[in-house]
Image: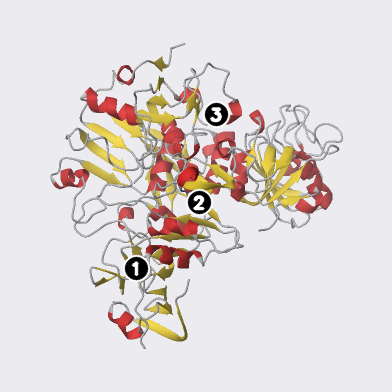
């Protein structure tokens, strides 16, 4: 069986073509910063990014840190599906908003829970489901409404993607993953919904059999590529910009 | 001298089905004969067995010291865990199934028809049924292989059309019976392997659907 | 905050009244809440709705105390011998809703996750899809299934803390984590001694204690066997 462990982030993203859709995990911790950086340098464009936030808050963030927002700013992204696309300051529109205004990007705003569930559904073979979130608001306009047990819900459709960029704490060579605390967030669900799931590993990649099966959060059958973050890779030191 | 007619045992049927498993495949094994398949993985191939109850990455059927009552397959028989094993809950287990990740599933059946329908959840006269995970698995696995006896109480089970309520329409790719290996082709079954000692006519006589036999018919060996 | 730990199974079920709906975890007896089922039997409660993988029910069905079962197995495996559920179905004394196991699991998961309904490809083209809404997504046909929730969930776990955080052992897991989310009152029988809050590693917890209302440690003379006895 093919070895899933790769040596560099460059190798891991080398074959990602223009036009790819990429699920990008993270909510502060758990953001696959090394993979995003590698994708940035690889040059792929016309991307669709699905993430909690994609550079919507404050632009590209801390100097020197490449995020999904950087990809957006440089015009490499044609569509974003996220729970945050706008700036929190009316006077300073986010990059996404500016590009939206210029007609250069499509931005689909979706409630975070709905986003998570759409991704989970995609990974679980469910094409659509109903949720109460956003009923009665702007985001429900145009969506199918339905009543169950006297409450109104709207129908949402599943999300899957070509790639999923994941960040975990520990892994084994089979690709079984364990997450640490709040690093988990979107990671386990995105791992199931990408056709090619690529994982950057913080602590260690151990041989098969070293992880306790009951403690594994994501079975390795969902994972195609693993890279251990080297000492000079992007470590997690605290809140990253969205 | 005539070769003695051989009917495959459950183990041999499972072993024959297991020959289909390719390196790296994710394979689900259903209750009964199919769960014997994990004892017969061809050497040199790594197969990831998925059990509907949430065990991902199990191995052969456990005996003696290997038995952990907490580690069981779909037949609720103890199995060993592979070094790469993990556990998921039931909804996630079927999420793996429903999202099309099973390269193959081996299931038992009461009947199979030439167009690839099969029935394995409701017996004649039964009011209830036993579906288990079969409908989920059959609807979404990439390949469905059946392990079943060719006849029951003398009645053929490879039919033109299933008379029992079906589990899924048109999904069966291969049928391993105790006397041969067959592929549903739409209007007929193509027999690709024949058990030692049997003639084509003998098998045709106990197969209700039409039987096609090519020049490449082989004797079934495991 | 309310104390969740109870001393006996009987106390834990003392308010379970006639007509209750109960999710019962377990797969082939592994992860099955055998002690809670025994307490339920002794309680005398009737007119129950049971939701489980198999419609066994610790003799409750035979005693005529079950009004409805939702399960993926309702029939006997022997054609000549009807199961208790089938006998009662024949007499019109029980409603038996047969559902594919994966659909059952997802219906329960949806119930616990606030999702009223979802689409699945399972059972399309079979008897079980009759009468269900069909819809095509991306060229494939799916059917609509509705969520399941219940008054009680009977859970069996390996380890727990007093907050009700739960850890399951291997294939004991199965329906337990999802059923725990889908009931108004989740009652758990615990195999290992219940530990204080803070003793379990948060990353290893399978079911957050917010889903759990009652915990009972299985005493030495309780039903401690795992699964079916060896054949």
Instruction: Say what secondary structure mark 2 lies in.
Output: strand
- Which one is nearer the viewer's eye here, A141 or B123? B123
Name the residue that disc number 3 marks.
C205
Q: Are marks 1 and 3 on the same chain?
A: no
Could you tell me residue A49's position as x and y percent?
A: 69, 46
Q: Residue at x 43, y 12 (%)?
A: C3
Q: Nearer the viewer, mark 2 or mark 1?
A: 2
- Which one is nearer the viewer's eye here, C6 or C212? C6
Task: Please identify the quarter of the rendering in which residue C49 is found.
Answer: top left
Chain letter for mark 2? B
Name the residue that disc number 1 marks.
B112
Could one spot residue A44 in this view of the protein? no
Chain letter for mark 3? C
- Which one is nearer the viewer's eye here, B46 or C114? B46
Name the residue that disc number 2 marks.
B50
Q: Tell whether A181 sits left or right of C206.
A: right
Instruction: Say what secondary structure mark 1 lies in.
Output: strand
Spatial CA span between label 1 and label 3: 44 Å
Q: Residues within 10 Å of mark 3 (few under 14, many from 20)?
A: some
Q: Tell whether C115 sits left or right of C10.
A: right
């Amino acid at each position: 069986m093919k070895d899933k462990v790769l040596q560099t982030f460059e190798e891991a993203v080398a074959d990602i073509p223009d036009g790819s859709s990429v699920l990008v995990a993270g909510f502060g911790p758990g953001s696959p910063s090394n993979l995003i950086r590698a994708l940035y340098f690889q040059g792929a464009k016309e991307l669709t990014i699905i993430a909690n936030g994609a550079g919507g808050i404050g632009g590209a963030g801390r100097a020197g840190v490449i995020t999904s927002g950087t990809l957006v700013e440089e015009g490499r992204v044609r569509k974003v599906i996220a729970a945050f696309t706008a700036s929190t300051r009316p006077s300073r529109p986010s990059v996404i908003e500016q590009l939206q205004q210029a007609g250069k990007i499509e931005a689909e705003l979706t409630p975070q829970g709905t986003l998570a569930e759409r991704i989970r559904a995609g990974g679980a073979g469910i094409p659509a489901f109903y949720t109460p979130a956003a009923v009665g608001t702007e985001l429900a306009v145009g969506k199918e409404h339905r009543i169950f047990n006297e409450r109104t819900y709207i129908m949402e459709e599943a999300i899957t993607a070509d790639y999923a960029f994941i960040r975990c704490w520990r892994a084994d060579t089979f690709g079984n993953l364990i997450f640490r605390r709040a690093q988990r967030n979107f990671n386990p669900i995105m791992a199931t919904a990408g056709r090619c799931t690529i994982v950057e590993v913080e602590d260690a990649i151990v041989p098969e059999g070293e992880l306790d099966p009951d403690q594994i959060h994501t079975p390795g059958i969902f994972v195609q590529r693993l890279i251990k973050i080297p000492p000079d890779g992007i470590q997690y030191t605290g809140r990253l910009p969205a | 001298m005539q070769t003695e007619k051989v009917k495959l045992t459950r183990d041999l049927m499972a072993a024959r089905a297991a020959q289909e498993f390719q390196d790296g495949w994710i394979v689900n094994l259903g209750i009964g004969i199919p769960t014997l398949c994990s004892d017969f993985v061809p050497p040199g191939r790594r197969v990831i067995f998925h059990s509907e109850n949430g065990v991902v990455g199990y191995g052969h059927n456990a005996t003696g010291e290997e038995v952990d009552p907490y580690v069981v397959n779909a037949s609720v028989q103890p199995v060993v865990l592979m070094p790469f094993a993990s556990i998921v809950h039931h909804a996630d287990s079927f999420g793996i199934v429903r999202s099309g990740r099973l390269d193959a599933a081996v299931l038992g059946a009461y009947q199979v028809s030439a167009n690839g329908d099969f029935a394995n959840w409701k017996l004649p006269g039964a009011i209830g049924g036993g579906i288990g995970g079969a409908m989920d698995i059959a609807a979404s696995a990439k390949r469905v292989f059946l392990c079943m006896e060719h006849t029951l109480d003398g009645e053929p089970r490879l039919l033109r059309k299933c008379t029992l309520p079906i589990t899924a329409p048109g999904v069966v790719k291969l049928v391993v019976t105790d006397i041969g290996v067959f592929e549903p082709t739409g209007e007929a079954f193509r027999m690709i392997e024949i058990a030692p000692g049997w003639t084509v006519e003998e098998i045709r006589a106990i197969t209700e659907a039409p039987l096609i036999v090519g020049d490449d018919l082989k004797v079934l060996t495991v | 905050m309310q104390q969740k730990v109870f001393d006996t199974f009987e106390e834990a079920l003392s308010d379970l009244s006639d007509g209750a709906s109960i999710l019962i975890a377990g797969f082939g007896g592994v992860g099955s809440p055998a002690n809670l089922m025994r307490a339920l039997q002794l309680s005398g409660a009737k007119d129950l709705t049971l939701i489980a993988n198999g419609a066994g029910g610790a003799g409750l069905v035979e005693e005529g105390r079950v009004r409805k079962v939702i399960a993926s197995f309702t029939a006997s495996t022997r054609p000549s011998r009807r199961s208790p559920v089938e006998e009662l179905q024949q007499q019109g004394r029980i409603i038996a809703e047969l559902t594919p196991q994966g659909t059952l699991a997802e219906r329960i998961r949806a119930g616990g996750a606030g999702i009223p309904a979802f689409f699945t490809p399972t059972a399309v083209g079979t008897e079980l899809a009759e009468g269900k809404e069909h819809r095509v997504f991306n060229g494939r046909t799916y059917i609509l299934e509705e969520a399941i929730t219940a008054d009680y969930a009977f859970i069996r776990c390996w380890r727990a803390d007093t907050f009700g955080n739960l850890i399951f052992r291997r294939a004991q897991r199965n329906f337990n984590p999802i059923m725990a989310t889908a009931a108004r009152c989740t009652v758990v029988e615990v195999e290992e001694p219940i530990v204080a809050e803070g003793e379990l590693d948060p990353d290893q917890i399978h079911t957050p204690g917010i889903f759990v209302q009652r915990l009972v440690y299985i005493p030495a003379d309780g039903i401690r066997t795992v699964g079916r006895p060896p054949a």
